[in-house]
Image (cartoon, rainbow, N blue to C red):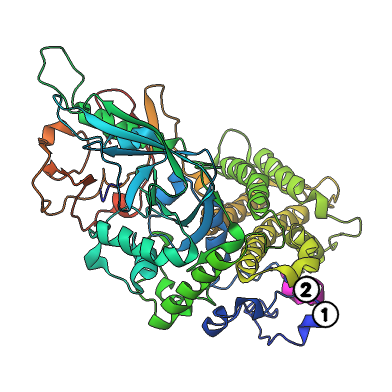
Amino acid sequence: MFLTLVGWFVLPSLAAQVPLGLSPHGKPSLELGTASAIAQPYNSANPLDSDSLDRSSWRLDEPPPANETGHFVFETVNSLLQHWPNTRYRNGHTMVPGVIPKGTLLYHGAVNDTIPTVPEWTATDPEHSILFCEGSPDTGCWHLTLAATRPLKVLYFDGTSAGNTLNGTLDTQDIIAWGELRPDWRFEEDQRIEDLCKWGVQYAVDGFVRMEMDFEVMLCDFTAGLEVVSWSHLASIVEPVSTVPTIPNPFLLRMFEVMHAGSWHNRYPGDTRINLDLAGIVSLYDTALAPSLIGSRDGQERCDHGIRAISSADIEAVRRSVSHTLERDQGDTSGIDWKTLFRVIVERYSERFDLMDYLLNSENSTIVDRALKVHVQLRVMLTPYIFHSTVPPRTPYDLSNSWAAPVFKACGTAHTSPMVSYISSLNPSERLLLQAVQETAREICRVITKMWASGVLAGLDIYHPRDSTPDAAQMVHLMGSWRQELSALMTWLDWSVWVRCRPACGPEEMCYLPSWPINVPRGRRPRHPPHRQFESSDIINTSFPDSLPLTHGLLMQLTSPQDDDWRKPQPRCIRRVAPYGF
């Protein structure tokens, strides 16, 4: 609508078929196939059996290689259809097939009572579509509610994929619609939806799911698998001329309520009206699928990751891979519940890391007391993996802490070791998911095992007492080391669950991230005549241009975002009642 506004596994019988190299960890590297193999995805190589690795591959002093992307895939999967993380990282890298279940409602705002006969936009929440229910106070406006009469087949683009920016928010759609990146066509929304739908016909795609202030569905045919629930002639949302007192700027009220509706889907499980098929995920963070992008990420923060450096060959490989996922039978999977697997890991560690971060940076008690509390948390997380035979050396000269390697390995493979028997049934998308879990769990377990082991050697573990009691100077050094290690791990994981308003917002407020199109830096004026004028005094702490046009159902704004609050949005509290400010 809308606002342009993997431990590592391989079955022994397969080992001879897989060409292996050595990774920076010293372990055999995971090959998911080359671009040429994407055309025949089920021939790609399989992960390696962790039990075949030698002990040196589980060294606590070996961090992951710099170009590893499993943690990016992990957080992407953990963030799908969630407004908050996809606002935080606007440049999408991922496409996932899915279905909108039978009975789901979709909404469309219009200027007349004609049901669209061409591809058009619908909203998942009426607060969003109402913004496009255009009409004067004299004529009113029209609002259509549709219900799915069968499962609707869709393709989801992650990120702020309905944001018409120069930053790359539309790039994955360009690849699918046109087979090339066309930033100069960022406002060609009618052409984009038309060409996406033309491309999707061969795969029986009913629509495409995107996100801006809220989630939207680009519907290809309003009569296919849908029925009209209501076609309502509503009172106009345009402010009438009246002597009755009104809140400041009713249009800002409408804009806020769209953002408010989007915030309902901020966190897990996100917008549950779209069911994604993770076994068909295609990610530009897959280094085997898009190797041309590896170098472009060197030294870059994730907020600066884009896909402009992608080669023509990789574009074709991506399109073939997406085509394959849409052609496959959705029952053609291993049956693994990937969504739950990812969520289990996040739930197991996220709050504990948050607590440890607080304890490491607090001054509410003695340093020894805080160190003991942190070490308790470390031991709690590792308890399922600390064997009776795990005994530290009497002298702390083993700088690599090899005595703790079995703990590291047991922890790092705990969630994936049962999948060794499923390797032959995993398709390329599932292998990418498995790799993401393995790489993420491995680094989590490496760091927390290393921290725990250093605490044991410092005499903090009651199950492994030392000859001497830890002193304050020792604790200062240990806590400083822990603080650095945990901070680096949390930065590497970069889970959006840790990004929130601190202190929490008040009852008249909502926690908010600078969003499209509200907070884009001021650009040149829109090319279309404005629907209504806004003075700068109308907007509090916003970056609107001098006018905002509602034209052809699209709130359009030209911009070349530059400021850092847009590039790297930080949470802040905004008002839920007038006076509004974004």
Considering depth in this image, is 475 or 359 the residue closer to the camera? 359
Q: Which of the 4 image quarters holds residue 421?
A: bottom right
Residue 12's tag is 1
Residue 250 horizontal side relative to residue 546, left or right: right
Q: Earlier in the sequence, mark 2 or mark 1?
A: 1
> Seen in the image, is 85 located left or right of residue 457?
left
Q: How many marks?
A: 2
- Which secondary structure lies at badge 1? helix
State the image coordinates of residue 29 (x, y, percent, origin top left). Answer: 66, 79
- Between label 2 and label 1, give the one nearer the viewer: 1
Q: Residues within 10 Å of mark 2 (few under 14, many from 20)?
A: many
In the image, farthest residue toward the right: 388
Prevailing SS of the magenta stretch: helix
Q: Is residue 297 above or below residue 74?
A: below
The range drawn in magenta is 50-59
CB within 8 Å, label 2 to label 1 = yes
Badge 1 local density, few (<14 within 10 Å), some, or many (20+)? few
Across and down, in percent, residue 250 comes to 21, 26
> Is 253 placed left or right of 277 in the picture?
left
Res. 451 in view: yes
Which quarter shows the C terminus? top left
| Alpha-carbon span between mark 2 and mark 1 | 8 Å
| Residue behind mark 2 | 49
Q: Is residue 165 visible?
A: no
Q: Nearer the viewer, residue 375 or 521?
A: 521
Residue 58, magenta (yes or no):
yes
Tag 2 secondary structure: loop
